[in-house]
Amino acid sequence: MSEINVSIVKKNNDKELFLRFPSKVYDDKHIMQDKIFEREVLENTNILCKGVKTVPLIAKNKNDEVVARCLLSFYEDDTAYIGFFECINNSEAAKELLTAGESIAREEGKKKILGPIDLSFWARYRFCTSEDLPYIGEPANKVYYKGLWEENGFKVSEEYISNFFDVADESFDSEKARKRLQSAKDEGYVFTHPNVDDFEKYLRDIYPVLIEGYKDFCGFKMISEEDFVKLYSPLKMVIDPETVFLAYKDGDLKGFLICLPDYGNLLCKARTPALLLSVMNVKSHAKRYVLLYMGIDAKCPGLGSALSQLVVDMLKAKSCCAVSALIDSGKATGGYFKENIKEKRKYVLLEKTIGD
């Protein structure tokens, strides 16, 4: 009989244990936990909790110590989504937790389990297959997590990559991309940056392009324009407007590419005056930018390449390096400036069939 006990998180004390557990798994440099977001999820008050049933689980050993945790998300489809997964390097702890999650998923009538996905596409998802210092927005986890899931019948269903680039110099160029940029300008595209004083307007412009471009991604769940604006409005405090590129034609947004200064895990930390100063310093003196969000109207081929050329020109001017983040393997964006890629990181989603 197992010495691991798994239970649904209901009591306030267990909620606190759920929230504290990641700090026992990671050191201060690698932890990417947003406690405010997680607390809102546990209290079912976050925007992303609309229309979803959540079941948080914790696993404890015989000494009543937490050894693993996760949260199941159930929508109207036939898939159970499992996220917020953390575990010590112990096969029994992982097995008991994942088995309990599978049992609940079966009771809910689900046919497969997909993860790791924290609620949906709009939050953190994917396992990184290495354990490097994380950049902003990167899913960070212990390298053994993937193996623990595979021991319990999960198989890789989707793969992603991040491409790392050195400081851009004059050799960092693409004749094809530059021609695409010039052609776009000749065709009447207007490239601009957002005004943070009217940030909501730009978010509303981005919303339909993003929805259309990402609607088929794993874990995607529809959210309203109003909720989208609420979700992303805080970005205006941390973006550098000069590193956000918008492409308009005939007054309509046709594409966007959002680069953020690499804050690492700073934005996950407790809000203090010292943290604010650190964020302001990174924003003003960023050494690396992360190409984190990109969306292109499907009727505008070549526009992504044109926007990427604008980013390269910006990186040259700032003498900065960059990360092209979390690209779905096989997508065209993974090939932009491929001859200049210095390093790659890989990520996976895993799934397990549990029903007919």
Image (cartoon, grey):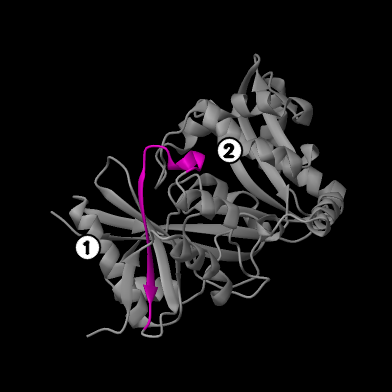
Residue furthest to the top = 250
Can residue 135 be seen in this snapshot? yes
Q: Secondary structure at mark 2?
A: helix
**Quarter-of-image position of residue 136:** bottom right
* Left or right of 200 on screen, residue 53: left
The circle drawn on residue 103 is 1
Q: Is residue 10 left or right of residue 125?
A: left
Say which label, 2 or 1, has the lower sequence index.
1
* Residue 167 locus on image (x, y percent): 79, 58
Q: Which residue is mark 2?
A: 231
- The quarter of the picture where residue 268 lies is bottom right
Residue 144, by quadrant, is bottom left
For residue 58, above or below residue 114: below
Tell me if 218 is positioned left or right of 21 in this view.
left
Q: Which residues are magenta?
A: 45-61
Front in this rendered view, residue 259 or 52: 52
Q: Is residue 147 above or below residue 317?
A: below
Q: Is residue 125 magenta?
A: no
The dot on residue 124 is none
Where is residue 297 drawn, in percent x and y? 53, 28
Query: Which sits in the foreground, 52 or 188?
Result: 52
Look at 35% across and 71% down and name the residue there. Answer: 149
Q: Residues within 10 Å of mark 1 (few under 14, many from 20)?
A: few
Give percent across and percent down for residue 333.
Answer: 56, 46
Q: Quadrant of the N terminus?
A: bottom left
Distance Cα–Cα, label 2 vs label 1: 32 Å
Considering every residue shown, the one lying at the far left of the view is 356
Q: Secondary structure at mark 1?
A: helix
Tell me what residue is drawn at x 49 percent, y 68 percent. Answer: 17
Kindly identify the amino acid type of the residue bearing the numbered disc 1.
Answer: Ser
